[in-house]
Amino acid sequence: MPATPSSTAAVSALGPEDGLLYGYWLRPGLLAQRIGLAELDEALATDTGTVWLHFNLSNVRARRWLAQSERVPEEMKTALEERDDRPRIDRLDDGLFAVISDFDYQEPGEFGLLRTLWIHAGTRLMLTARAHAVRSTDSLRVWVCGGLHMRSGIELFIELLSVRSDLLERLVDEMTEQVNEIEDAILTGGGAEREHLARIRRRCVRLRRTFGPERTALQKLDRQRAGWIDEDAIEQWHDATETLAFLLDDQSELYERAKLLQEEIASRVAEDTNRNLYVLSVLSAVLLPMTLVTGIFGMNTAGLPFASGDHAFGWVLLIILAAGLGTAALLFFKRLL
């Protein structure tokens, strides 16, 4: 439905409080300039520089602008309208459209849930939108404010992938360190960490399920990069693709290590259980004849031997001990003890 003049004017002046979290105009030799939607056309009308706009989808006005603007491709409009969060990277005539996963903010220094980030990267413009605060865009904002310059929106998207790969590498390194500590504890006879290993395996599965389709899409576009990507960005794209592939291989290896450690713990638990059962079985076998003797002499019937006499109790104790020692000797010679 076409926007009315009043609604167009209302969304043209979006600011941070209205869903545009931040906008930057990146030009060679200059620090990044903060801009709003009112300055977008002016920035793109020049011959240099790249514009990055980052939106908060929790805001109604931001969603309205994204749904109405001619600068937003139809693929992105449809995905945002349906909240389609299937990971993918699709090539468009004027760039690409991507739906990728990013790390949510939780506790400081900790990785929370995986959230969805919708991206359109073109020749001069990159649009990003999210419903929850994520780490990669905030880290990229810090780099942009520090003087990072990119010649195109696609190069800025590649840099965003690199920033996210750094976060993924940190997460994989943290999990690897945890697995190393658990492995050392197991080798030194420490306590079992089955639940911790199970959590690491679940996180590895989720990472593989989330980032696997992205790796496939990146590798597919990497083979076609010469036909649609700037020559200067080809190597950067290839590096981003290879980095993600290596990190996923590392987390797959980490998953297998956690699985093997869980199996080692289960094997040791089963070994300890079998050892305890063996001890109980030996004790039962030794005590059974002794229990039989005490049961016989405990019957309250006439005619029991040693029923009277000053040394009857001692003789019964000797018979009980002899039965136990005899059983133990038999088990020893049968190599069961």
Image (tube, grey):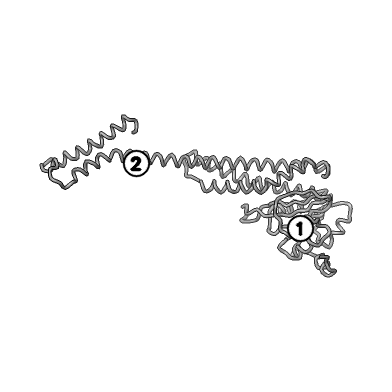
Left or right: 286, with 159 as reference point:
left
Q: Answer with mark 2 or mark 1, whichever residue precedes in sequence.
A: 1
Q: Position of residue 264 (x, y in %)?
A: 50, 39
Amino acid type, mark 1 = Thr
Quadrant that contains the N terminus: bottom right
Residue 319 found in image quarter: top left
Real-space Cα distance between discs 2 and 1? Answer: 68 Å
User: In the drawing, what numbered circle is on residue 97?
Assistant: none
Query: Does residue 149 appear anywhere in the picture?
Result: no
| 128 in relation to 244, above or below | below
Left or right: 303, with 176 as reference point:
left
Quadrant that contains the C terminus: top left
Mark 1 — residue? 78
> Could you say whether the residue bearing mark 1 is in a helix, strand or loop?
helix
> Could you say whether the residue bearing mark 2 is in a helix, strand or loop?
helix
Q: Position of residue 66 (x, y in %)?
A: 78, 60
Left or right: 253, with 237 as reference point:
left
Left or right: 227, with 179 as reference point:
right
Mark 2 — residue? 280
Q: Total of numbered circles in the picture?
A: 2
Name the residue rendered at 65%, 55% in the picture.
Answer: 104
